[in-house]
Every structure is written in structure tokens, then in C-alpha cells.
Image: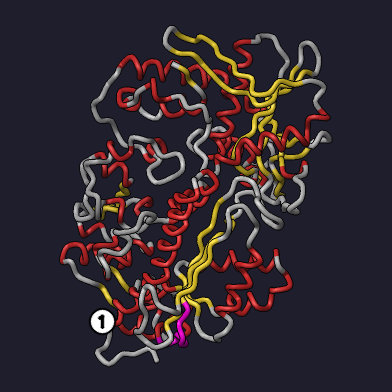
Amino acid sequence: MKVTANILLNYIRCRRYASLNDPDLEYQSQEYDVQSHNYFQDYLDIFLAKYENTFKSFQRNVKLSYDFHPDVVLFENYHFVTEKTNNLKEIYCLIPSTSKDFLKIRYTENKHKYQLFNKNPKGIYHIKQGKILATKSNYLDKLDKLKTRTEDIGRIVYNYAFKQFLFDMINPNNNTKVYFVLLNSDYIYDGKDYTKSLFNIFDFSLLFDHYKEIIEADIYRMINHIELNDFTPCALVKKECRKGDSFECKFVNFCFSHLPKENSLLDYFSSHRGFNEPTEEGEIHHDTFELLNEGMVDILDIPISWLKDEKHLMQRYCTETDYLHIHKEKIETMLKTLKYPLIYLDFEALPCLLPRYSGEKPFTQSVFQYSVHIEKAEGKLNLDDKYHYEYISNHEYDNRRELVLNLIRIINKYDSTVIVYHKTFEQQRLKEFQTIFPEYKNELQNIIDRLFDLKDVLKNNKKFYIEKGFTEYEANRFNFYSQQLSGSYSLKKVIKVFNESAYDNLVIRNGVEAYKAYMRLGDLEPTERDKTINNLLEYCKQDTYSMFEIIQGLKKHLSPDFTIT
């Protein structure tokens, strides 16, 4: 069985993983599951093009393995192995992530803040040696974060240590250094040629002594899990299961299958904070995963005496009674601020590993599509209305200027409200367009100034309601809740309260499916490409129409004579 760092990290999550997993299917040629995997090869090629002249000689994609155990072969791919002297090599491994989280780490010594990673004269970031004994220093705490494999940045360092460990096992007494290359999140592509500034190189060797024994112990722990082959359930652990995040265990759905699909304990707002049980001796805090392991899995399993937060009590009541919570006065107050004709806007964007076009950064949300519905008269709008406008970029070209100009032409024909869902996303994309196309800054600002977040109508906007004269208690309350939401205010959840069949007949049903479909366009035959483009247009169109449907659905529960205009 081939074992890479990521495979090892999976096997040591819990003893059950080994019994559920098929080792013959475990190893993948790609080391990372990245949305923009199509661009990883370009990442390697660009790095080589920029650094080849600094390498006296090198080997590319060196695969090394070591028979650690009769059934376990340690295996890794080293992207660039360079010869310095006979006994010295430098190895560069490229990671499909940015260096942002490393470079923002600061530690404190005697009330002064210092950046943990410093750049040496060779341009390589290394860990600064802190004064551990300094008064009021949290230097060691920051190092501990890098040593924690359940943290995202700790997992990257663990990958580094595994690669160094394996190389040293094969080449004892060597003086080789492994460097990790990450993308510079501040790098702005000029649209012509990538430069060395795209990359940040890191030296984590200060932490290797800490990891040597840990990795060997982890390998034996993995072997023990494999030999035990124990299928019986084990405790759910938040930082090992990683439910809902990028390093989620692939067996989460199986191990959490005893939880209800809707309205589980995890669906309480801020459930990660746990719950407090009142007793005569004082409050006893219960971790949420502790409660799950004790069999409390339903939202109704929590004793009502443990619920102090008004929002939790609202969730509980709505779930118990199938009650639809509507704060009529607050919803009406916010809807009354809308100005017709109402313009519904939605973007689709690609989180690309490498910046595609001029002005973009690594992992920029690169907009490739929009949908606009315009409700001219109150309550009058169809899905395929003549006042629906859409645009999708040609996947082979930079169509952003055309996209922006069309958007400005359509929206700035009016001076009315532009409705979006989760305003931060569209607002940030428009601000990025202002930077990329400064000649349209004012026109884009006109749109930004008119953005209205429909989620605020459903959830809350405390500042708005305080300014409108509501008490702090009322301003803090959520405006809308249904047990169908299961604690989520995503557009896809909310629309189902008012239109159960929304999205059901679509091929593409969420944003991740949308950008992955767009990424595949270049690999499709013309007929399939046309079908996929049509599927993308239908999906984005449903997003903007869903916002209209939500407002119409809300109005049915407001005052009988309520109108926006």
C-alpha cells in the first residue's frame, strides 16, 4: 500500500477509517484535491521557467518510495530536485495554496509584535528565532499552531515534514533541504507574463526535529489501525472528522448517518460553541461533539432549559410546531426601502489557482457569468421574462470588459435598487472590476451604492433597525425562520420554503457545479459545450428569479394591504 502524507493524515483520524477504506483505491496520482486542478501543471511549468536558470542541474517530478513495513510503502513526489554539491540537494515542492495564512502570523514579545516568517537574502521565508524566555512572549504558542496537524497551515507543515522524513530515510547522512513553494496572494498578474513574485518559498526546517518522531509514531499508529480492522463506531471528533470543511473525512456521511438529515443538533446557530446546562452548583458546559457521542443528535434532544439564546428558542419552537416565524414589522420596514424597478443580480465566478487575466490574483473569484432580472411593476415578473438579461464569457478569451460594459448598460439605465443575495460577494467582485477597469470606476460605484442584500430581510441587519428606531432586543432578532431551513440561510434553502421545486429540473444546481462545468468547456465537443453553456445560463437565471420568488413569498405573510410601492 502506497502511503503519502495526505493518506497518512487520513488514516490517523480514527481507528475506523482503515476498516472503511479500500487501500487499492486510496492512492491518487494527484496529491491534492484542488478545484482548479487543471491549472496545477501550469503552476509547475511557470515555476520552472522562472527558476530554471538558478538551478545548476535538476530532476523534475522525482518519485521516491521506501519499504517501511511489509504492507506499507512510503511514497512522495518531489517536483524539483536540484543538485548543489555531491552531498547537498535542494528540493522544491509546490503547494496549491497561498502563503497568506503563514505571513499574517505575528507573535508578541514585551508588547511588540513581530512577523513569525522573515525573508532571508536568498528570498526564502524562514521561521524567526524568538526570545522564548522573553517576558510576555507568545512565540511558542504561534509555533504550536504550525505543529498542529488538524489546522490547515499545520497540515501543510506536516506534508513538508513527511517529505523531508522520507528523503532522509532513503538518503541518510545527507544535507538536503526541502522547500515548499506557495502562491503569493498579493501578486497581481499583468496579463502578459508571470514573474517570480508569483511564488513565495518557505523553509520549515526549524520544525523538523519536532516532527521526526511524531511522523514515525503516526505511521505505526496507521499500521495498528489497519491491523485492527475495527469497523465498530468510534467517537466523533470535530477536528478529525472535519465535517463541512476542505479536509472533511470521506466517510463523514456514513459515520454521521445516525443524525437526522434535517434539524440535527449541529443545525443550531453557532452549535460549535456547545451548550450550558444549568445546575444548582452553576452552569456545566457541554461540547457539541460530546453530546453527539452521548446520543443527543436531534435539535429537539437538547433540554429546553439549556437554551438561553432567543434565536435558539426560535429554532426550537419552529421545529417543534412547524411554525413559520415572520417578524412582519421589521420585514415590511426593510422592503419599503426598495425602489422600483427592482433589479436582481447574480454573478458566477471561478476560484482559479492561477490568475487568468490582467489584474487578478491567485485564487481570485474570476467572474465569467451574470444574470439580471428586472421587475418593472410590483409582483410582475416571469422566469423567461423579456426583461431578463444574461451573459457568459467565452472560455477561451478575456471577456471581462464586455461583461462589465453590458452590465453597466443594463443596470445603470435605471437609478433603482439592485438586489443580490449575500451582498459581500457581488460587492467585492464589482470593487475588483473597479481596480481592473478604473475608467469605469464611477459607473461601477453607482451599482455598488445601490446594492441591497436580500439576506438582510430574512436574517437581520442590526444597524439598519437601530437607525429605524427599533429597540436593541428587536433589532437583534432574526426576521424569518422555518424548520425547513435547518439553521441555514443559503439561497437554495430559503427558496425551498416558497417554491419546493426550484432548481429540481436543472442539470446544474449550485455554484460549485457551475464553475466546474465552466472549467470543462474547453474539453467538450461543440454539441456538448452548447448544452453545458445552456445549463449554466439556466442555473444563473434561476438564482436571480429565486430572489423575486422569495420576496413574493414573504409578502403573502405580511399585512394584507402591504405593498412596496
Residue ID at (33%, 38%): 252
Residue ID at (69%, 9%): 173
Pointer 1 residue: 556
Is 34 located above or below residue 338 in the figure?
Answer: above
**Residue sitting at the far left:** 321
Q: Which quadrant of the figure contains the C terminus?
A: bottom left
Residue 142's x, y, as percent? 60, 40
When asked about the image quadrant of residue 172, the answer is top right
Task: Give the class, few, some or many, for how many residues have Cα within 10 Å of label 1's Cα (few <14, many ≥20).
Answer: few
Residue 481's x, y, as percent? 29, 69
**Along the line of sight, the residue nearer the viewer: 90 or 154:** 90
Residue ID at (23%, 62%): 316
Is 251 located above or below residue 214 in the figure?
Answer: below
**Along the line of sight, the residue nearer the viewer: 468 or 543:** 543
**Along the line of sight, the residue nearer the viewer: 180 or 462:** 180
Disc 1 on helix, strand or loop?
A: loop
User: Residue type at mark 1?
Assistant: Lys
Would you say 373 lies left or right of 116 here? left
When asked about the image quadrant of residue 320, the answer is bottom left
Range shown magenta: 336-343
The answer to whether residue 425 is seen in the rendering is: no
**Along the line of sight, the residue nearer the viewer: 187 or 119:** 187
Residue ID at (30%, 82%): 555
| Magenta-span inclusion, residue 487 | no
Q: Main secondary structure of the magenta part?
A: loop
The answer to whether residue 358 is seen in the rendering is: yes
| Magenta-span inclusion, residue 341 | yes
Would you say 147 lies left or right of 7 here? right
Would you say 371 lies left or right of 225 here? right
